[in-house]
């Protein structure tokens, strides 16, 4: 299946899954539990590719979007960027919790850096 993400055509592969939200979207602790019905075929291979590339220290990013069935030109919700903390295998496939990325120990959010927001230089 092909879809548009930011003006770029992207290819998606069907995979049976179930998503259960942890909390409301307006909360900084928003997250979801994702169960993938891959039966040990896809996720273990992808995890091995991550290990082989030496990038196992980087947490996977989950980009959540929801569309209305009668309006597929743009998402109704999202994109919401989440981070998969720990991927576990179950007898039915794989599962993980996707949560807002933790930037420090007490809160989540977006890091404002001088590289991204040059106008901050005047306040330093």
Image (spheres, grey):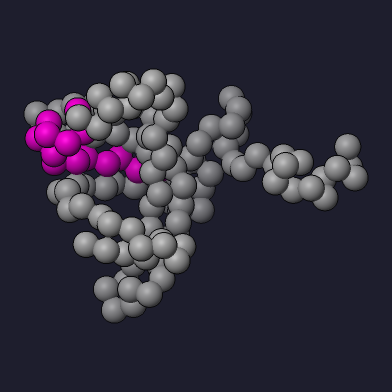
The quadrant of the picture occupied by the C terminus is top right
Give percent across and percent down for residue 93.
14, 34
Residue 84 visible in this rendered orientation of the protein: yes
Based on the picture, tell me whether residue 6 belongs to the magenta stretch: no
Residue 110 vs 92, above or below: the answer is below
Residue 66 visible in this rendered orientation of the protein: no
Q: Residue placed farthest to the front in the image? A: 53
Q: How many marks?
A: 0
Residue 55 vs 111, above or below: the answer is above
Tell me the residue at 45%/66% (across/down): 7
Tell me the residue at 53%/32% (across/down): 102
Q: Residue placed farthest to the bottom in the image? A: 70
Q: Where on the picture, by quarter, is residue 92?
A: top left
For the residue pair 8 and 32, the one nearer the viewer reads as 8
Residue 67 falls left or right of residue 90: right
Q: Where on the picture, by quarter, is residue 113?
A: top right
Give, as a single range, the part of the protein colored magenta: 31-44
Residue 87 falls left or right of residue 89: right
The quadrant of the picture occupied by the N terminus is bottom left
Residue 40 falls left or right of residue 50: left
Residue 119 vs 43, above or below: the answer is below
Tell me the residue at 21%/47% (across/down): 18
Residue 71 vs 54, above or below: the answer is below
Give percent across and percent down for residue 69.
27, 73
Tell me the residue at 45%/56% (across/down): 79
For the residue pair 60 and 11, the one nearer the viewer reads as 11
Based on the picture, tell me whether residue 38 belongs to the magenta stretch: yes
Give percent across and percent down for residue 39.
9, 35
Give percent across and percent down for residue 97.
34, 35
């Amino acid at each position: 299946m092909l879809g548009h993400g930011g003006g770029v055509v992207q290819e998606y592969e069907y995979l049976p899954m179930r998503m259960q939200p942890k909390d409301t979207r307006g909360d900084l602790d928003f997250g979801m539990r994702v169960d993938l019905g891959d039966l040990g075929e896809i996720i273990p291979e992808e995890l091995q590719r991550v290990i082989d590339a030496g990038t196992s220290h980087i947490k996977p990013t989950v980009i959540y979007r929801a569309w209305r069935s009668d309006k597929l030109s743009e998402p109704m919700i999202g994109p919401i960027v989440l981070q998969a903390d720990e991927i576990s295998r179950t007898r039915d496939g794989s599962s993980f919790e996707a949560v807002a990325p933790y930037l420090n120990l007490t809160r989540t959010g977006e890091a404002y850096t001088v590289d991204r927001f040059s106008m901050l230089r005047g306040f330093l």
